[in-house]
Amino acid sequence: MPRLVISPRLRTLTGLALLTLACGGTRERVIRDCPPAEAQPAATVERGSAPAPTPTPAPFVEQAIAPAGEHPFSVLDLLALDRISDPQVSPDGKKVAFVVRKTDLAENRGRTDLWVVGLDGSGPVQLTTHPDSESSPQWAPDSQTLYFLAGHEGTTQVWRVAVGEAPTRVSDFPVDVANLLLSPDGRTLLFSAEVYPECDEAPEGALACTAARAKQKADKASGTGNLYTRLFVRHWDTWKDGRRSQLFAWPIGAPGAVHVSRGVDGDVPSKPFGGSDEYTFTPDGRGVVFAARVAGTSEPWSTNFDLYHAPIGASGPPMNLTEGNPAWDTRPQFSPDGKTLAYLAMKRPGYEADRFHLVLQPWPQGQPRALTDAWDRSIEEFRWSRDGETIYAAAEDTGRTSVFAIDPATGQVREHLKGGALHDLEIVGDRLLFLRNDLTRPDEIYVATDDGAATAVTRWNDAKLANARIGQAEQFSFEGANKETVHGWVVRPPGLKDGEKAPIAFLIHGGPQGSFGDRWSFRWNPQTYAGAGYAAVMIDFHGSTGYGQKFTDAIRDDWGGKPLVDLQKGLAAALAKYPWLDGARACALGASYGGFMVNWIASQWPDAFRCLVNHDGVFDNRMMYYSTEELWFSEWEHMGPYWQFTKNHELHNPANHVDKWRLPMLVIHGGLDYRISDTQGIATFTALQRRGIPSRLLHFPDENHWVLRPANSKVWHETVLGWLDLWLRSPGGAATAAK
């Protein structure tokens, strides 16, 4: 049972990525001096090894985006909120550094700065003010100095800053560097860089060779054609240009870097969302353990990531540590005593949503031991306690992402902190630091003691949320497909009076192995609908994560079956439980798999809705298979390649049922979406227009599977809510939808 339920919340991700912290900083003000840690000095850079500090341009002036005075939450509030990420605790345990992203609406982008805040809430202090962005903070052992990445002078390089001092560039590599990780002694930095494989053996080194080849290829006289001999041709939102991400070790101040992953035909870290959590230093500091998937000819249908060990400076290729597992191995982390390597592993190859369980392996040699096989939850991230007697793990559980305490000797699991969405775990002595968000507010930094008592370190967005009325969120459950319990969420519009009914925005999540859950989103946020007067209803149908692996697996070869039943029963259950929901005025909205389901609803369940919104959804399963980049996805979901399992791919193919479509639909797609090509959205719009169905197409040529640019997000929300207003509120729209 949880020791304490804490209130504010969220998850990284991904992720993701995608997605944070530091002493004196995410939220508040001035910091005190901290004594140096033990006898380990910070590495120094020799004079003349890098340019002197350059004058800092005028800092970014934050723009007033949200309206003044009390008002319902809107997309303008969403854009105005700051985003905290990447918290990094100082070695002395007194402060945390983090990244803060602010919206630059004028430039249609987000920009980031580094902050530091004391763990007692003192500060915060802003460390960087450059109009460009900074990322990847890493503390030196002195707890005073931070290394970070910035592209202030043309290329992204390593910089250094201390509280109260001007940042200084300390590297001068010929290519951009990314994903920093500093060794415990502060003398060596790991980073990744994009290099050409043919440069692995170049006498001048892979970095210099890559810079020269890139310059040569940019010569217009050489033409623009790219010749491919294997997949991937493109991935996520980028066409491949022959380079791959590789891992390098840099003794700080040395004239060059060591190519650690040389000889591995794959990306380190993985693309598109991998980061420095995919590698770590060995206990002696002389080597690196990293995760990589060998590309070869099978990368687009493989999920076989392995862990490799590479001594820094060794001449031979890295050694595969997990060759016996044909599925995913990642996130290596050593125990405090250096005797055990822990990592996350899946068991089923070709399946990106298999359960991640925790594996312990004696170091440097020994048999791996699966620790959490008896626990039916998938671990997202973990941290060893300082004494090595507990492993803290974040995992989705029944609509929330909570922290669990695992006994490394027995594998016994207990809930330690209940979500919201808890993520980016860091150890601070005998305490646990983390980010937390939920359906009512974005990430803040928290610290929790061993008894589960949690304290907020930051209140970063309190002022920006003070005037925005937030909708009340509530979880509910019902009997879904196969008479199994299914969960959902409702968000009530703020200010809805007793006796009034709210029209419904029926939000359908993507994945399909995903979850809406009790977490904040800067894209599909139910508060933007609630603020506009719509009740948000969200169902975690069969296939959703956090309800056991069997529940997640249930969607395989059944895309239009059990999930549709759950959505139907979930809406009926919500209408029965919440009398303020107006079932006669509802619109279904979804992205990715949710967009597929919108297309499926158009023919299989049209009577429940007046309108539909399809963002980056699948229209034709056949061309989805042949045009997507990650073939493992379609092959797992539909049992294999299209030409061998045609009936499976066609079983729930929306393109085969266009003759039954009649509901008005808004179609949205990004031109850089290579997961689900924009031709799927164009085909959907073509079908609607040819049948004479009211429809619109919103196309973003500069967006991928997500809408990320602030101005585009504003256009997206205004267009979507305008579409809902047309069909759920205007007399003309209601009359047309009723025909």
Image (cartoon, rainbow, N blue to C red):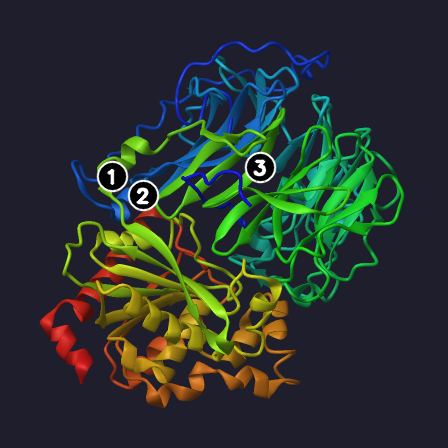
Image point 31% across, 28% down: which residue?
A: 61
- Do labels 1 and 3 touch, CB within 8 Å? no
Q: Which residue is mark 2?
A: 79
Depth order, front residue of 500/722: 500
Q: Is residue 209 at all visible to an observer of this figure?
A: no
Q: Which amino acid is tagged 3?
A: Leu
Image point 40% across, 47% down: which residue?
A: 520
Q: Is residue 90 above or below residue 308?
A: above
Q: Which residue is mark 1?
A: 65
- Give the percent coordinates (x, y) of residue 451: 56, 32
Q: Which mark is nearer the camera, 3 or 2? A: 3
Q: Which amino acid is tagged 1?
A: Ile
Residue 618 location, quadrant: bottom left
Mark 3 to mark 2: distance in Å? 26 Å
Q: Is residue 295 at all visible to an observer of this figure?
A: yes
Identify the mark at residue 425; answer none if there is no mark: 3
